[in-house]
Image (spheres, rainbow, N blue to C red):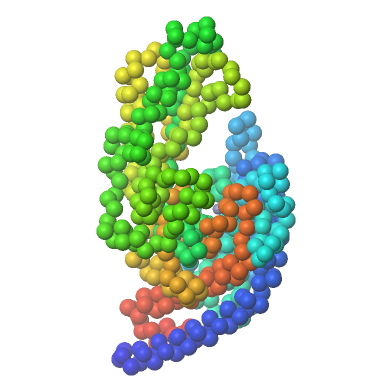
């Protein structure tokens, strides 16, 4: 094709795009009230996945998701993912995973949207200003449990598809949905389902998009990495029962003192992990990465004020971001069996179990971390010559996830954010763990992008969770624009084998 022809095609294409943008934006603007009402209906369902007494609500929530997708004309399936075993050995049906598909055009890219509709627990008595399951608007903010995490984002993706349908515009991509109801308690059953459908539902998926995180500041962001987590239990057992410290203190070797002694060898006061072989595995910080962190919007004083501390581990932005996102850390969470009630009981606990975790980053391997931590703790424990016994076990071993930001998917994402917010997004990572991204990457081999909206002050998992009314629309518009943007990527892909003109005349 000659350059002139290509130019005219791109011109026509950008005119079509501009026309579609405007039509879609107007449609979304006009339907903001409908989006608020849809969110209200979903927030009213107490789909708390951690409370087995609310399981029927969770099932009802999944049915509502399936119904919405069916009404939109998708081919919908409610996938049975089996049962979960409760600590009392009782078995309980897991909420079904809802999958749906819109469009099967083999010449188009297929984007799969992942989201969850279960929520964290919430009670008015926890300190909510409003009923957490009755969406309440105050100054343009919509308060309710699950509003931001993750019901509004899931609805936004659906509304984006719906906007195309209602305007009789062809969807620029095939869109699939995978919506689950167990995310807040570890996505029980989802990995097995993804594995089972790897060669069916996921076989034609090109990209996966997740909107289950937040921005870092008021500046729009795209997330390209999350830390993993290795969670440990270290138990020290001593006398056969708790003892009186007046009667026995000074004669027995106390399990708690052993435990605290070994815990103190995990990390230095300046944040250096002391377990041999852990820091060595960490990918070095590259110059590019350092430069990227320099440009990210992050106010150190705001951060300090938000958490109420006068001093942080590091006092500059780059070090703080690097240690929040791309370096491992040790956190000690608690000690089971320790005397933690109010009062002054003079007890020597006979058995204590520490809980601590190490956040994982590339290129750490949970299996290696498990071995190194266990060896280290046993070696420092042995030096104490204690008669007590130590057992170390790793109960969670979630790997980190890191995407290639040079991938065309990220080009599309960045362009979509720029189109909607008129600013380039910050490319950020998440210090927490969202295991599903890594699972998707490992099992399906597809590229994953995380596109959040707002969220830095949305109070996820906390009291007074909210999403702004405007974020609802922006989210929807961002989804719509990402679809369009992916069409551009598609064209680039297609021009390699076929001409853009062929594709263009077929599609429009
Ligand atoms: Zn979430």
Could you tell me which quadrant the N terminus lies in? bottom left
Number of numbered labels in the structure image: 0
- Hey, which quadrant is residue 477 in on the image? bottom right
Q: Is 250 placed above or below 285 here? A: above
Q: Is 270 placed above or below 458 here? A: above
Residue name at image x 69 percent, y 62 percent: 138
Q: Is 250 placed above or below 276 here? A: above
358 sits to left or right of 51: left
Residue 388 rendering spot, x and y as whole percentages: 42, 15
Q: Is 386 placed above or below 305 here? A: above
- Hey, which quadrant is residue 223 in on the image? bottom left
Q: Nearer the viewer, residue 57 or 284?
A: 284
Residue name at image x 32 percent, y 28 percent: 375
486 sits to left or right of 465: left
Q: Is residue 189 visible?
A: no
Q: Nearer the viewer, residue 207 or 321?
A: 321
Q: Is residue 345 visible?
A: yes
203 sits to left or right of 62: left
Residue name at image x 35 percent, y 55 percent: 318
Q: Nearer the viewer, residue 353 or 79?
A: 353
Residue 19 rendering spot, x and y as whole percentages: 53, 86
- Hey, which quadrant is residue 398 in on the image? top left
Residue name at image x 58 percent, y 79 percent: 24
Residue 249 rendering spot, x and y as whole percentages: 48, 10
């Amino acid at each position: 094709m000659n350059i002139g022809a290509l130019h005219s095609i791109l011109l026509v294409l950008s005119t079509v795009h501009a026309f579609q943008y405007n039509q879609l934006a107007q449609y979304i603007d006009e339907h903001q009230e409908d989006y608020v009402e849809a969110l209200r209906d979903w927030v009213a369902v107490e789909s708390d996945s951690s409370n087995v007494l609310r399981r029927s609500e969770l099932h009802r929530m999944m049915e509502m998701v399936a119904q919405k997708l069916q009404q939109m004309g998708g081919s919908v399936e409610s996938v049975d993912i089996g049962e979960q075993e409760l600590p009392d050995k009782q078995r309980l049906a897991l909420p079904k995973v809802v999958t749906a598909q819109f469009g099967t055009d083999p010449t188009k890219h297929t984007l799969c949207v992942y989201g969850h509709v279960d929520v964290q627990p919430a009670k008015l008595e926890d300190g909510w200003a409003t009923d957490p399951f009755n969406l309440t608007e105050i100054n343009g903010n919509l308060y309710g449990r699950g509003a931001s995490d993750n019901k509004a984002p899931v609805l936004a993706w659906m509304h984006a598809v719906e906007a195309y349908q209602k305007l009789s515009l062809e969807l620029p991509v095939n869109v699939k949905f995978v919506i689950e109801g167990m995310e807040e308690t570890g996505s029980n059953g989802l990995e097995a389902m993804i594995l089972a459908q790897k060669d069916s539902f996921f076989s034609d998926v090109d990209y996966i998009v997740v909107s289950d995180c937040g921005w870092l500041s008021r500046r729009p962001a795209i997330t390209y990495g999350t830390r993993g987590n290795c969670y440990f239990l270290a138990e020290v057992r001593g006398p056969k029962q708790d003892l009186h410290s007046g009667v026995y203190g000074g004669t027995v070797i106390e399990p708690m003192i052993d435990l605290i002694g070994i815990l103190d060898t995990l990390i230095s006061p300046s944040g250096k992990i002391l377990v041999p072989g852990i820091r060595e595995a960490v990918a070095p910080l590259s110059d590019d990465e350092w430069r990227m962190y320099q440009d990210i919007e992050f106010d150190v004083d705001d951060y300090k004020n938000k958490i109420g501390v006068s001093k942080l581990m590091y006092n500059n932005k780059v070090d703080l971001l690097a240690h929040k996102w791309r370096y491992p850390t040790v956190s000690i969470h608690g000690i089971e069996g320790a005397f933690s009630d109010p009062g002054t009981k003079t007890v020597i606990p006979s058995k204590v179990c520490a809980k601590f975790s190490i956040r994982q980053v590339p290129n750490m391997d949970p299996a290696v971390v498990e071995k190194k931590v266990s060896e280290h703790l046993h070696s420092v424990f042995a030096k104490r010559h204690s008669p007590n016994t130590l057992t170390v076990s790793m109960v969670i071993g979630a790997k980190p996830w890191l995407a290639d930001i040079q991938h065309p998917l990220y080009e599309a994402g960045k362009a979509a954010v720029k189109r909607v917010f008129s600013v380039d997004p910050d490319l950020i990572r998440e210090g927490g763990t969202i295991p599903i991204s890594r699972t998707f990457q490992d099992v399906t081999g597809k590229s994953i992008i995380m596109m959040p909206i707002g969220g830095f002050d949305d109070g996820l998992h906390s009291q007074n969770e909210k999403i702004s009314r405007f974020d609802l629309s922006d989210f929807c518009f961002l989804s719509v624009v990402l679809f369009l943007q992916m069409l551009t990527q598609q064209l680039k892909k297609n021009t390699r084998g076929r001409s853009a003109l062929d594709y263009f005349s077929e599609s429009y």
